[in-house]
Amino acid sequence: MIKAFKFFMLVSVMSFYACGSDSIEGGAASASIAVEASANEVGYGEGVTFTLQNVTESDVASVCWDFGDGETSDAFAPSHAYRIPDDYTVVASVTLSTGEVKEYKTLVKVFAEEINSAVRLSIPESLTDRHYQVCAHRGYWKEAPENSVSAIEKAIQNGIDFIEIDVRMTEDNELVLMHNATIDETTNGTGKVSDLTFEEIKSYYLYFDGRQTMEHVPSLAEALMAARGKIYVDIDMKISDYRSVYNIVKQCGMLSQCMFTVYELQDASNLLNIDKTVNVFPVVYTMDDLDGFMSLVDKLAIVQFNSEAWKNDILEKAYSNGIAGFMNVYVNDDDTPYTDNYQKVNRFVSLGGTVAQTDFPVELKKYLDNLKRD
């Protein structure tokens, strides 16, 4: 196996032979054409070379390769590098010298290696010293469309610690970032995410500050790769298909860098049945909630305390068991740091919070960086 390095990705290629035994005149008689890749594993950014087996270039009038990621080539034996982890069906449309047109396919599975602590601490590791951290709600949407790649990049540029993103599933089972059930408010399109195909959603443009941009709704994989190695991710799932979300996070090598928001014990149990080491991120309203999640999740690292749970006995029990507190501060709120002179931030500090989720990440980051935890 190739030695791992930062942003290293593995591509696992499985070739499927075309059905039947195709006879080709002119040197390839009785041979079955197949698509073959140059390697079963390849580093991210390195080329995978695709070739047609059991046929010579003189037997082929033309070929069009569709790599499955929007890129194509008419070369006889092209090389291609994938940017985003996913499962890609590569199609070679071959016109033979006899005039026959045939299609041959291969499946390409692209992975990123899991980020280790030498590259960036895991979320639980980052919480051990309880320094203040800030989470940008839906990305830094004050300078870019919410739940967009540019909103993630803006948060990174401003030194924010976490982003929160919302995930939904399209009609054809692709995962995209979208808070609302419909795309009406945030794009120039209309309709429910669950009623639209991935291609349809990708044809629309995101709005920012009431204006249409040139940016499209990102897939979950695109968002994770924008964040990879640079910022932690809180995934607020608007669907119940935890397996699909988990699979993409794993494929992007981001399990240590992501946490999965859950509201019910059953949701947490479903996640743990997939992977007992996953970063479960419960929302707690009562002491019973806290007790339930603590009993279920081994080494629970962080919980989101709803304002109803901002009570001394609940907070003290969590903190005494090494659980960090995540709280909303100026989220969908009429108050701002400017109108209340940071009083809600001071309340967060007095309650012993560690991560503040907010619509004002830059302001809170600067304010909290100037404070020292007792």
Image (cartoon, helix red, strand yellow):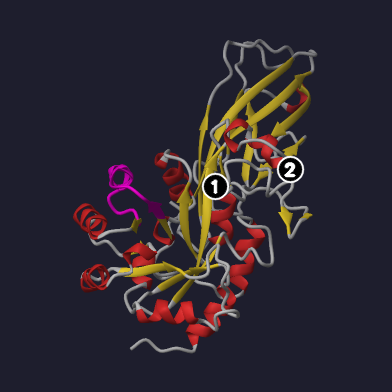
Q: Is residue 148 magenta?
A: no
- Residue placed under numbered mark 2 in the picture: 204
Residue pictured at 67% horizontal, 43% vertical: 79
> In this view of the protein, which residue sits in the foreground, 184 or 70?
184
Residue situated in front as seen by the camera: 252 or 357: 357
The CA span between labels 2 and 1 is 23 Å
Q: Is residue 30 left or right of residue 134?
A: right
| Residue stretch in magenta | 260-279
* Residue 334 visible from this viewpoint: yes
Q: Earlier in the sequence, mark 2 or mark 1?
A: 1
> Which amino acid type corresponds to the residue marked 1 in the rendered image?
Pro
Residue 278 is covered by the magenta coloring: yes
Label 1 sits on a secondary structure element that is: loop
Name the foreground residue: 299 vs 350: 350
Q: Height in image: 243 above or below 286?
A: above
Asked if residue 165 lies left or right of residue 60, the reply is: left
Compared with 27, 2 (above or below) is below
Residue 234's spot in the image, x, y percent?
46, 59
Name the residue located 59 percent from the left edge and 11 percent from the top edge: 21
**In the rendered image of this protein, does residue 4 appear above or below residue 339?**
above
Where residue 364 sits: x, y (%)?
53, 78
- Of the 4 image quadrants, the one containing the C terminus is bottom left
Q: Which residue is mark 1?
A: 85
Q: Residues within 10 Å of mark 1 (few under 14, many from 20)?
A: many
Judge whether 141 appears above or below 132 on screen: above
Labels 2 and 1 touching (C-beta < 8 A) = no
